[in-house]
Image (cartoon, rainbow, N blue to C red):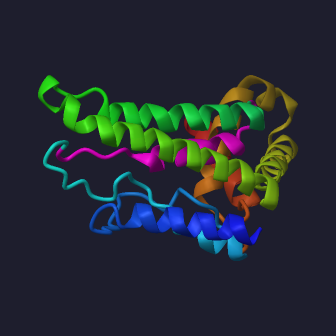
Amino acid sequence: MLKFILSYLVLAALLLFSGDGATAQPHQKWCGTDSKNIFGFITSLAPEYYPQLNKSRSCPKRRAQIWRSCRSHDECEWHLGISLSKCHDKFIRNLKCECAKAFVHVPASLKQGCAALAASCNQIANIYYAFMLKGDLLTNSGNEAKAEARQVFTTLKRKLGPAVISRNRRYIFDRISFYCPRYKDKNNDCRINFTANRIIVDLARR
């Protein structure tokens, strides 16, 4: 466990100092875990971009939006229509897609200069993926997310009845996966009743 923690700290330091350390972002923190333990503290250092701010003259103004993959993975874990294994598979695909968008699909004049960043970005994607799997094993976060999503769904069934649920099942799954990662209580758990009530309002507006 100590070796695992130290290796993550080294990774975080390398990523954080790959640019100027800018932290202003138009979204909440998505990468890492909110767990109130040493693992949660360490993974909170995980940068949302790679590199943080690219000043390379050979591949200017390009960086992978890693946070998008982390956000999608969080949403997937709360989605009752998708298994955890599929969420994990989707995570690594999305990470590498972000790398490709940032460093591979570039003008011909930049391809050579961006090649090194493209390769390192894919290495970072593999490391993020490995740590996600390890973190899920240590914290059981994926199964806990599914359990919370089922609580929301059960609450909705009780309030709305089986007919409404049957007609809107897929939509309800999508809304649970949207609200739960964004609205948590002080223990970082999904706000069950709040989420259920928001979805009831959403259904009324459809």
Q: Is residue 77 visible?
A: yes
Compared with 184, 126 (above or below) is: above
**Is residue 44 a member of the stretch shown in magenta?**
no
Placement of 189 over or under 67, stated as above or below: below
Identity of the residue drawn at 27% across and 58% down: 53
Q: Toward the viewer: 45 or 170?
A: 45
Above or below residue 45? Residue 86 is: above
Picture quarter with the C terminus: top right
Residue 68 magenta: yes
Left or right relative to 87: residue 29: left
Q: Nearer the viewer, residue 45 or 26?
A: 45
Q: Nearer the viewer, residue 81 or 192?
A: 81
Q: Which residues are magenta?
A: 60-81
Dividing the picture into quarters, in which one does residue 202 lie?
A: top right
Up the image or down, 123 lies above or below 97; here it is below
In the rendered image, the quadrant that contains the N terminus is bottom right
> Which residue: 21% across, 31% down?
112
Q: Nearer the viewer, residue 58 or 62?
A: 58
Q: Quadrant of residue 59?
A: top left
Q: Horizontal placement of 206 versus 67: left or right? A: right
Q: Residue at x 19, y 47 (%)?
A: 61
- Indicate the position of residue 21 as horizontal and vertical percent values: 32, 69
Residue 148 placement (x, y as % from top left): 80, 53
Q: Is residue 107 left or right of residue 115?
A: left
Task: Name the residue located 78 percent from the left edge and 49 percent from the top edge.
Answer: 152
User: Percent from the top left, x then y, of residue 102?
Assistant: 31, 37
Q: Is residue 121 left or right of residue 109?
A: right
Q: Looking at the picture, how far across and down is residue 22, in whole percent?
A: 30, 67
